[in-house]
Image (cartoon, helix red, strand yellow):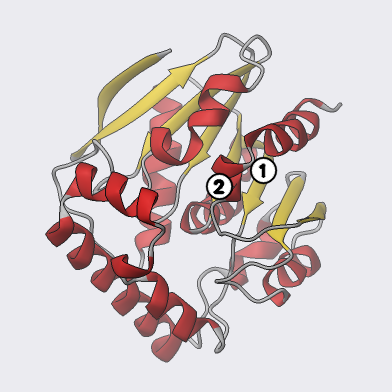
Amino acid sequence: MKEQKIQIDDVNINFIRNGTGDHPVLLLPGVLGAGWLIFAPQIEDLNTEKLTIVAWDPPGYGKSRPPDRTYPDNYYQRDAMWAHSLMKTLGYSKFSLVGCSDGGTTALLLAATYPESIRKMIVVATRSYIHPDEINTQEDAADIDNFPEDLRELLVEIYGVDYIKQTLSKWFDAALRFYNKQDGDLCKQALPKINCPTLILHGSNDPLLVPDQALDLKQNIINSTIYIYENDTPNDISIHPEAFNKVITEFLLEK
């Protein structure tokens, strides 16, 4: 396992790489997520003989700082471009994606924009648009006081309270802009351009997303399958790693 930084365009991106397999897989975390913070069980325990795992810290998150995180209107597209450039620079012309939450939306755009580069894709708790019922839940999610205590303590240790509050405020402001200026559209127009096999993981009791999000992805991504799992938090990928790793491994390695 190796952690390092590499310059992509005008930013230094931190990433962890583990494994020697001939199937590269990029892990994309969501808001305030660093690769090792969200995906530690996947980095450590997926099949590293058949897979090569790359987990990145999007610029502004984790150890990819400075700069501070920003949320312009094209930030999902920007992150997709950076992520693609990272993998190409590392020598991977074709790779798979596992994206969680905001990282899943980035993965959708990456797969739509660079279809020739993507082998397979898994998205977890991911949306392509903002449903009206999600505005209030996202506002609650943008308040650090509503985070589970253990996660809150860990994030404060990494970022400090001020940076967390500023970042979450900018993230929620961006969501309001998307909702008001674009009818909530994050990447719906891009979904029909995705042609890689896609697995949509969605919690039956997701506290942030409406169930229609998974159905919308299934209807608009041609070669896609939904897997509904029982859940009680939005961070189940790290809380129940054995079950998730089994599903991820079977999907990525099946012929």
Residue lying at the far front of the rendered structure: 149
The residue under label 1 is 121
Judged by depth in the image, the label closer to the viewer, 2 or 1, is 2
Residue occupying image coordinates x 63% and y 61%: 232
Q: Are marks 2 and 1 in contact (CB under 8 Å)?
A: yes
User: Residue 245: x, y in percent?
Assistant: 68, 32
Secondary-structure class at tag 2? strand
Residue situated in front as seen by the camera: 74 or 64: 64
Q: Amino acid at mark 2?
A: Gly
Residue occupying image coordinates x 43% and y 12%: 1
Residue 48 lies, with reference to residue 104, above or below; the image says above
Residue 59 lies, with reference to residue 53, above or below; the image says below
Residue occupying image coordinates x 76% and y 37%: 247
Of the two numbered discs 2 and 1 on the same chain, state the one appearing first in sequence. Answer: 2
163 to the left or right of 175: left
Quarter of the image for the C terminus: give it.
top right
User: Residue 49: x, y in percent?
Assistant: 65, 9
Residue 88 lies, with reference to residue 57, above or below; the image says above
- The picture quadrant where one finds residue 20 is top right
- The picture quadrant where one finds residue 168 is bottom left
User: Residue 63: x, y in percent?
Assistant: 24, 36
Q: Which mark is residue 49?
A: none
Q: Which mark is residue 99?
A: 2
Q: CA distance from mark 2 to mark 1?
A: 8 Å
Residue 36 lies, with reference to residue 66, above or below; the image says above
Secondary-structure class at tag 1? strand
